[in-house]
Structures are given as C-alpha cells and as structure tokens.
Amino acid sequence: MPQQFDSTTRRKLRVRASMRKIRSDRPRLSVHRTSQHIYAQVIDDAGQKTLAAASTLDTSLKGELKSGANIDAAKRVGALVAERAKAAGVTQVRFDRGAYIFHGRVKALAEAAREAGLDF
C-alpha cells in the first residue's frame, strides 16, 4: 500500500528532489517569504555554510521600510544580499525559490540581485 503524505510534505519532497537534481559547484541563493517578511541567504552546500544573508528584519533596512511584505522591500533585500555576497567573494549563484512561484516578491528579489551584480 503506498504511503500517503499531506500536501505540505509532498511539496517539500518535490522541492528537495529538484534541488538534488541540479547539484552545482555554485552556492545557492535561497529565498523564504512569509506574510510579513522576506529572507534571502547565499548558502554554500559543499561547506554547509551561509556566506551572506539579508532580510526585512535587518537593522539597516527595518527603519527605512514601510512594510516588509511588499515588492519594494523585496527589491531592497535582493540588492542587499547581492552586495553582501559580492563582499564575500561570490558572484555566481543558483536561485532556489523553494516552493514559491517566480512571481511578485520572489521575482522582485531575484531581479534586484541580478541588477546588483549576482549572476544566475
């Protein structure tokens, strides 16, 4: 009898399976969004280290943003994580959007990171 999973577990399994297929020597730019904030981090999977991170909760952004849950905030986080990644010596990444559709805040973060100098 096949094992049954709920929709959340199936989504997590599907996302991780796709990440295993595209193993790369590049670090990955991982995005997580909630209803109130957006987070991004550049992760080196080989060394299991976070190389750079940014979110709407950063002190440098928190006072300037009206809300952490809009496209403008995502653009600022994308530019900030790209700046921090370049300072850490990373210019090429692969984009890990998780289970999120490449639309809205996720797309805005990715485009801002590209404009700031990350290549993916």
Image (cartoon, grey):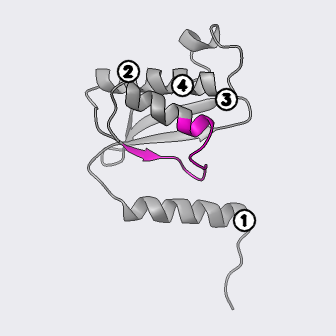
Secondary structure of the residue carrying numbered label 4: helix
Task: Kindly identify the residue that appears in the image at 33 percent across and 27 percent down.
Answer: 117
Residue at which label 3 appears: 37
Q: Residue placed farthest to the bottom in the image?
A: 1
The amino acid beneath tag 3 is: His
Report x, y in % for residue 70.
68, 27
Name the one closer to the observer, 113 or 52: 113
Pair 2/1: label in front: 2
Residue 57, by quadrant, is top right
Marks 3 and 1, Cα distance to the nearest angstrom?
A: 23 Å
**In screen coordinates, is 62 left or right of 49?**
right
* Quadrant occupied by the C terminus: top left
Report x, y in % for residue 35.
74, 35
Magenta-drawn segment = 94-107
The amino acid beneath tag 1 is: Ser
The amino acid beneath tag 4 is: Lys
Residue at which label 4 appears: 75
Instruction: Point out the tag, 4 or 1, that comes first from the N-terminus.
Output: 1
Task: Kindly identify the residue that appears in the image at 46 percent across and 28 percent down.
Answer: 112
The amino acid beneath tag 2 is: Glu
Q: Residues within 10 Å of mark 4 (few under 14, many from 20)?
A: many
Q: Is residue 9 above or below residue 39?
A: below
For residue 106: magenta? yes
